[in-house]
Image (cartoon, grey):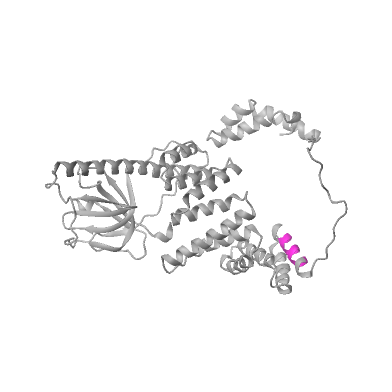
Amino acid sequence: MLADSGAHGKQLSNYLSLLAAGKSMEESFNQALQASYTALEGQLRSYVQRFGLPAVKFKLDTKLDIEKEMQLESLAEARAQFYLGDLLLHTNRLQEAETFLQKAIMLDSAFPGSYASMGLLRIRRQRHDEALPFLTRAVESDSTNYIAHYYYAMMLQEEQNDRNDEARRMRLELMRVHLKRSIELAPRYVEAYRMLAYVSLVLRDELTEAESLLKKAASFSPGRHELVLDLAQVMLANNEAAAARALVTPVANSPDSEVRTRAVQILDSIAKRLQYEQDVREYKQRQAEVAASAVGNDDRATRVSDADHGDIAPTLKRAPEPAPSPPAPGTPLRTEPQVEGLLSLIDCSKGLTLRIQVGKEVVQLHTDQVTEVEFTSDVPGIKDSIACGPLNPPVPVTVSYRRTGNSAFLGEPIRVLFVDKNQK
């Protein structure tokens, strides 16, 4: 960056860009720096031995406006205790920091800064249940500490003890308020953007704004693959599957196993979404052709009756734990299509027929081989079986299926997963 009057700065920039594009460290090094490790080490040793840090001169267009006289202000004892405690907190001297912060709170119980620092101290000590009351006091006093608002939202996310959907939505909306406040106070703090996108994905609203904000965050940290993957997930939820795929594909070859695992999972979801969209188009076309030609009366269960649903309830098992090992670079994706939506009817009278609400549309899946369908659940209230007939209220599901030529159905169900909304 500094040697030879900054002549090599572009090489370093190229090296980082190649790494971000998924090339290996060695390949990026050779291509960008055009030197061997030995040669560069020799240059580095020579540079360090001289230890003459070069100066960089800049000519400013306007003269700096500098205070000629230092302004002095008396500091109240409570603030002095807070600043000392906060300094010790930032140097990880937690026990000493707590002593000063406790005294600051005792001297001035209205100052939000002391509560914010005490909450962060509790998080450092992994005592999250004790952190939330301090952070709550800080943010309710309109703290200007951006990190306090962020961690308050994080503690709300971990709490997840909602009694119903409305309480859950209120908690997520409160998270959103404080994440936006964190961004307002520190526009370059990208972690707040990431959690705000999570809230939008769970609530399925403000997705366009979340996409715009993530693009802004990615411009602050162009080498952060996690931001690229977050952005792709929001784009997928925004029905931009093809664009999301183009964004994620280069990241799937990342040398980082965690990044690679997540990239492959997102690409898998994108492939399934694109296949599902194609299947729905063909499904509608088949139905239109049957209606136009007045043929299809012999097609089994062209419309499921709400009167007779049979009584052989599907047997369920708990959802399996995810595989711990990450996929290797170049791992092929599963292209088995999936449909995600609300299951409103299980008809067991003629095989098994599922009716699923997907947005404003309704699709049906059918199989004659009921015992070959695998039912799993991660919903606490659905353990061993679920009754045939209408489901009121409808239950969120993810259904893997295979395509068939039956004009009445989207396909044949293979696996049905009942999804816990609180674990999204």
**What x and y, as percent, mark residue 256?**
52, 41
**What x and y, as percent, mark residue 263?**
46, 42
Q: Nearer the viewer, residue 199 or 417?
A: 199
The part of the image, by quadrant, that contains residue 70 is bottom right
Please, what is the dominant secondary structure of the magenta stretch? Answer: helix
Note whether residue 385 is visible.
no
Q: Residue at x 49, y 38 (%)?
A: 251
Q: Is residue 87 magenta?
A: yes
Count all numbered tags in the image, as a single digit.
0
Residue sitting at the far left: 298
Residue 63 vertical placement versus 18 (above, below): below
**What x and y, as percent, mark residue 282?**
26, 40
Residue 280 vertical placement versus 306 (above, below): above
The part of the image, by quadrant, that contains residue 47 is top right
Q: Residue at x 55, y 62 (%)?
A: 155
- Report whether 255 appears left or right of 290: right
Q: Which image quarter holds the N terminus? A: top right
Q: Which residues are magenta?
A: 80-88
Q: Is residue 164 magenta?
A: no
Q: Nearer the viewer, residue 235 or 151?
A: 235
Note whether residue 246 is visible.
yes
Residue 4 vertical placement versus 323 (above, below): above
Q: Nearer the viewer, residue 417 or 397?
A: 397
**What x and y, as percent, mark residue 121?**
65, 63
Residue sitting at the far bottom: 106
Residue sitting at the far right: 69
Q: Which image quarter holds the C terminus? A: bottom left
